[in-house]
Each structure stands twice: as C-alpha cells, then as structure tokens.
Amino acid sequence: MADQPAASGPDAPRDSYAALRLPNFRRYICALFTLTLGIQIQGTVVGWQIYALTRDPLALGLVGLAEALPAISMALFAGHVADTHDRRRVALFALSVLVACSLTLWWLAGPRPVGGAPMLSATRVRAIYAVIVVSGLARAFLQPARQALSAELVPRALYSNAITWRSGTWQMAAVLGPALGGGLYALGGITLSYAVDAALMAGAVLLLASVRHRSPPRAVSHEPIRTSILGGLRFVFGDPLLLSALTLDLFSVLFGGAIALLPIFAGEILKAGPTALGLLRAAPAAGAVVASVLLARWPPFAHTGRNLLLAVAGFGVFTIGFGLSRSLPLSLGCLMLAGASDMVSVVIRSLMLQMRTPESLLGRVSSVNQIFIGSSNEIGAFESGVTARWWGAVGAVVVGGLATLGVVAIVAWRVPSLRRLRHLTT
C-alpha cells in the first residue's frame, strides 16, 4: 500500500507539495531525476558524436530508429511483465541494463577500445547503434514498470499532484542534462561525458532500490499470455477519449519534434557549438519546468479537452517559430514555449491514463502509451532525419509544425467529445 500523506482529508489534494510528503515517492522522484539526467547527457553526446563521425542528418534519425524499433517490438510484452511481477524489481533490472549500456559507450569512446587497435569511424558508429538497440530494449521494460509503480506509491486523491511533480522532475533533469552534457563534452570530450552518465545511472539504481515498497498481490489470471499482452490495446481502443488524447500527442510529436536536428541547427544554422547545443536541448524542458510549477498550483482541468487541444496547437506554432529563427535567443525562447505547451499536454494525458485505467491494467496501458508517445519521439527523430535530407533542416521543422496544427484540427473535428470534455478530477 502507498504511504499516507502527512495531511489527509478533503483539503489534502490542494496542498501543492502533498505527494512530496510521502517518503517513498520522494525516493522515486530522486531516482527519476538522476536517471533522466544521465539519459539526457547521453542523448546529447551521442547525437554530437554521431554527427561528427558521419556529417549525415539521416544518421541522427537512425539513432532514434535504433532505440524505437526494439522498444516498440517489446512494449506490449513489457507491459504484461509489469502487471504480473513486482514493478520495482522489473524497473531495477531494466535500470541495471542501462548502466551496462552507459559503461559500454564510455568504453567505446576511447581511441583504442578494442584489442589495442584504433577503431574505424564506421565500426564505431555501428557499435554505438548496437548499444542504443539494447538501451531501447531496456527502456521498453523500464517505462511501464516505472509509470505503474508511481501510481502505487501515492493515494488516488493525489494522482494529479504526483503526476505534476513527476513530470516536472523529469523536465528539470531534462533542462540540466543537455546543458551539462554539452559542458562536459566541451570540458573533457565524450569520455568524461559518458563516465558521468554511467555514474548517474548507477546512482539511479541505488535510489530506486531504497524505495521500500512491493507491488500488492494480484489475483492469478488464467488467460493466455497473448490475451493478456493485448489487454492494454483493447482497453485503449475501447476508450475514445483516451485514444484521441494519445493519438493527438502521437502525431504532434511524430511530426513536430525538432530535437534530432538540433546538432545541425547549433552547428550550421545558428553558427554555434556543443555548448549551444546543450542549451537548445535544455530549452524545451526549461519551459516545461516553469509550466509544471504553475500547474502544481493551477491544474488545467477546468476545460480539459479545450486546454489539451490548445496546448498541442501551441507546440506546433512555436516549433514553426524555431524553424524560422536565425537568432539563438529567439530559438531558445521558441523551444521554451514549445516545452511549456507540451507540459500541459503531458499532465492532462497522464492523468487521463491513470484515472481511467484499472490498477491491474496500468502496466499494459502504460506500454501502449509508450508505443504511442514514448517511441514517437524516436520515430519522429527518424522522420526528421529523412525530411531534413529532402528539404533541409529548416524545411523539415517548419513542415512538421504545420503538420502538427493539421493533426489538432482533425482531432478537434473528428472527436467532439474531447473538445467538450470539461472537468477531469480525482
């Protein structure tokens, strides 16, 4: 059972810090922060390293594809595992694999990592892609277990508050991680960057291990494993509101993401370097952190459907602004506003998922969410790489932002129940 908050009763959910008063949730949040910091450092350095080795925008997109394909292929099974095993233990195992991946990237960063002989650029790139594939498999199991575990650590009345802090913590690490990654790269190159990444991943394992919680026992299910695996899909496709919210974010992230192309914008369009790349990668999360602080006090649930549509539309508009900008401050501002818009969407969608899903299905439904949303970031990175090769980086980002606005218009037209959705409360 989840720990009880220090202050209970009908007014407890109005306490902006209510979820943080729970010791297990605090430990979970610290683990999430440390993990995300390491992942963001790694993503920044891998992107810069791959582009430096290949000078090919498609190679940046292939990094996302290398992570997304194994994550998608294993997501439904990973959700089944999260719903039939102790979620904390599943998350710890997946985290341990990510530590091994970080250590391997650190080892590969040396000039002579194999047998004392120099490694060719092409061989090094293939080895990095192989590590990213394994990382994608680990994250496929980590995501549903981690998200479902979060719901176990807090009472239902605090779901909205916990989701806001969980998302804000992730975004705070996403602010610091890219900037730290760029700074570490400039200070000590990829070797130092990957060493810090591995240390942070190991710290996340220790912090999550300190969470004193075991998943509650569940009734033994005699349904075939295939039926169990597909349970999350059946639930999502049977709930029009949840399906429309996931679809909205799927296509907006798929078309509107510009993160994979930031090395090109930093180095060739804005005429900056790895430190500026870190700032650009951090800017969306910086905007999201500001939004999360505001959302903790003023949740966006009075006009839920309208706010969700407006948030995703704002994401598209600010993405277009970034693509057209030739000024680093203006580019940072557009990315910050895009991140703030996305944060509103994340909080609304996450609460919809957590409130509308039975606890016994939460891992499997979270895995469907991972397919829709989490993997769309990586598939979107591949899409950005392909379209950048066709139209250039600027054209790819602008067209992607316009496509996002088109998706919002279609969903608003085709799903009037989402447009009319007002209160979403616990």
Image (cartoon, rainbow, N blue to C red):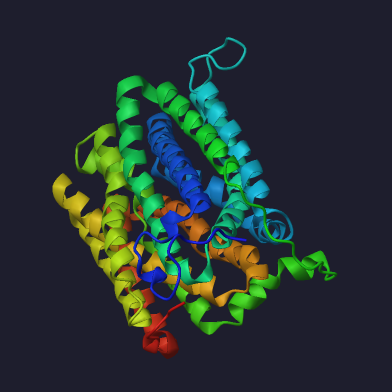
Residue 163 position within the rendered picture, expressed as x and y whole percent measured from the top left = 44, 62
Query: Is residue 70 among the parts visible in the rendering?
Result: no
The picture quadrant where one finds residue 222 is bottom right
Q: Nearer the viewer, residue 121 or 276?
A: 276
> Which quarter of the figure has residue 279?
top left
What residue is at 31 percent from the left and 22 percent from the top?
187
From the top left corner, tell me how far across and down residue 135 is, in percent: 58, 41
Can residue 131 be seen in this snapshot?
A: yes
Residue under the point 70% across and 58% down: 77
Horizontal arrangement in the rendering, residue 323 relative to residue 326 (left or right): right
Q: Classify 185 as above or below 318.
A: above
Count of numbered circles in the view: 0
- Residue 247 horizontal/vertical position (percent): 48, 73
Vertical arrangement, residue 222 with respect to residue 292, above or below = below
- Quarter of the image that includes the N terminus: bottom right
The quarter holding residue 406 reads bottom left
Q: What residue is shown at x 74% (from left), y 62% (from top)? A: 217
In the rendered structure, the answer to whether residue 198 lies left or right of residue 311 reads right
- Residue found farthest to the top: 116
Of residues 417 and 357, the one nearer the viewer is 357
Q: Which of 135/155 is in front?
A: 155
x and y, in percent, of residue 144 in the image? 60, 57
User: At x 40% / y 54%, what residue is drawn?
Assistant: 384
